[in-house]
């Protein structure tokens, strides 16, 4: 395979990983935002606290980790997604006759 | 206390419940943001995902939760489940068959009041027993109270606080394990899973997990209680716990036709 083809494959792999990462982030965020809302936090409050928390994240964390994430990070996303899903499910008001 | 008084007390206490929820919510958001960042998400990715998801949350959810808080039990009976631990484990509160004894409300020894004070002197026995009866963990039999089960299902504000506390604990463990130094031991965080579990057998799984988890948690509870009661006077202590949860994908009941989860779960290697 030529150097150009290798570069294209690597770029394609990076795009796929980034797209998967975004999908996973949305999955986690979807559930935790719903849990907070069910517990009484408004969307504005949630967004405000998230913005504040994001300011404290060192810029190099994501830069360094992008591209070298291993199974442990996928495991973390898996655990987070499933756990948040269960909590959100259990918080839903019960419907009579459901 | 009359029902009207209860409601007024609840309303007065609502801000403190709200601030507890809010403090927990802040801690959770900090955990989630840091975990996502550790896993490679940029702050922009996180904010844009939250913005997108927040836009889909109906406004009435938060309003309903806040309204419910004003009418729920005060948040300070946080140690109420510990009362059940002592009731089911301490020899003084067990009969000859090892079952928890029926107790009168008042009395110097072997009463609900003595039991509650042995857990926390600041707790009001009447409020605690009312809460336990309302949550069906205890039933009244004449002038005595009989515990029905050793597990307490928390609802309303207590339920919200429990959910947020559970979430915060879990996120703390994940974050610790992600960022710990090599010399530091990881906290226990394991799961067993199967990608081809038959849907028809889900009810059995639920029953099996309740039995297994219930038994394990009871043993764990006893283990903690034994160490709590035999600690040296003035010895530093920390809150510790063990949790169980079952997951399935989709989490929502398959028979009710609710929305399926949008994301594809990553394959674990």
Image (cartoon, coloured by chain):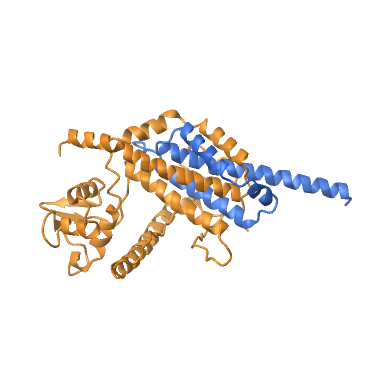
Chain colours: A blue, B orange
Indicate the position of residue A59 as horizontal and vertical percent values. Answer: 64, 45
Residue that lies at the very extreme toward the right in this rendered image: A2
State left or right for residue A91 relative to residue B139. Answer: right
Total numbered labels: 0
**What residue lies at 48% left-to-right and 46% top-to-bottom?**
A84
Instruction: Tell me if residue B124 can be seen.
Output: yes
The quadrant in which residue B81 appears is bottom left
State left or right for residue B64 relative to residue A66. Answer: left
Q: Is residue B218 above or below residue A94?
A: below
Q: In this view, does A10 lie above or below B57?
A: below
**What residue lies at 16% left-to-right and 50% top-to-bottom?**
B140
Indicate the position of residue B28 as horizontal and vertical percent values. Answer: 47, 46
**What residue lies at 20% left-to-right and 50% top-to-bottom?**
B124
Frontmost residue, A20 versus A33: A33
State left or right for residue B103 relative to residue B77. Answer: left
Residue that lies at the very extreme toward the top in this rendered image: B59
Indicate the position of residue A53 as horizontal and vertical percent values. Answer: 53, 42
Frontmost residue, A49 versus B144: A49
Q: In this view, does B101 lie above or below A15?
A: below
Instruction: Tell me if residue B260 can be seen.
Output: no
Name the quarter where the C terminus of chain A is drawn.
top left
């Amino acid at each position: 395979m030529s150097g150009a083809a290798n570069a294209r494959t690597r770029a394609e792999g990076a795009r796929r990983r980034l797209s998967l990462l975004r999908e996973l982030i949305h999955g986690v965020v979807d559930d935790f935002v719903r849990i907070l809302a069910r517990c009484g936090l408004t969307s504005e409050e949630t967004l405000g606290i998230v913005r504040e928390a994001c300011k404290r994240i060192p810029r190099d964390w994501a830069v360094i980790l992008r591209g070298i994430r291993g199974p442990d990070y996928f495991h973390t996303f898996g655990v987070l997604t499933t756990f948040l899903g269960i909590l959100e499910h259990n918080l839903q008001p019960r419907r009579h006759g459901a | 206390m009359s029902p009207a008084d209860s409601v007024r007390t609840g309303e007065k206490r609502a801000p403190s419940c709200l601030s507890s929820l809010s403090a927990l919510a802040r801690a959770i958001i900090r955990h989630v943001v840091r975990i996502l960042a550790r896993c490679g998400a940029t702050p922009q990715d996180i904010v844009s995902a939250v913005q997108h998801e927040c836009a889909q949350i109906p406004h009435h959810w938060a309003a309903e939760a806040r309204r419910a808080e004003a009418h729920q039990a005060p948040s300070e009976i946080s140690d109420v489940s510990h009362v059940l631990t002592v009731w089911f484990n301490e020899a003084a509160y067990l009969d000859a068959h090892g079952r928890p004894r029926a107790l009168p409300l008042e009395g110097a020894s072997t009463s609900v009041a003595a039991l509650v004070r042995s857990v926390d002197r600041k707790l009001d026995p009447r409020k605690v027993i009312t809460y336990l009866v309302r949550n069906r963990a205890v039933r009244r039999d004449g002038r005595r109270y009989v515990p029905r089960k050793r597990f307490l299902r928390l609802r309303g504000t207590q339920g919200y606080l429990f959910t947020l506390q559970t979430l915060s604990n879990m996120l703390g463990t994940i974050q610790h394990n992600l960022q710990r130094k090599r010399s530091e031991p990881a906290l226990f965080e394991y799961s067993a899973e199967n990608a081809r579990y038959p849907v028809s057998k889900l009810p059995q799984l639920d029953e099996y997990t309740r039995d297994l988890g219930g038994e394990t948690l009871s043993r764990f509870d006893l283990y903690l209680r034994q160490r709590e009661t035999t600690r040296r006077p003035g010895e530093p202590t920390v809150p510790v716990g063990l949790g169980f949860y079952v997951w399935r994908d989709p989490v929502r009941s398959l028979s009710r036709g609710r929305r399926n989860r949008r994301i594809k779960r990553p394959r674990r290697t």
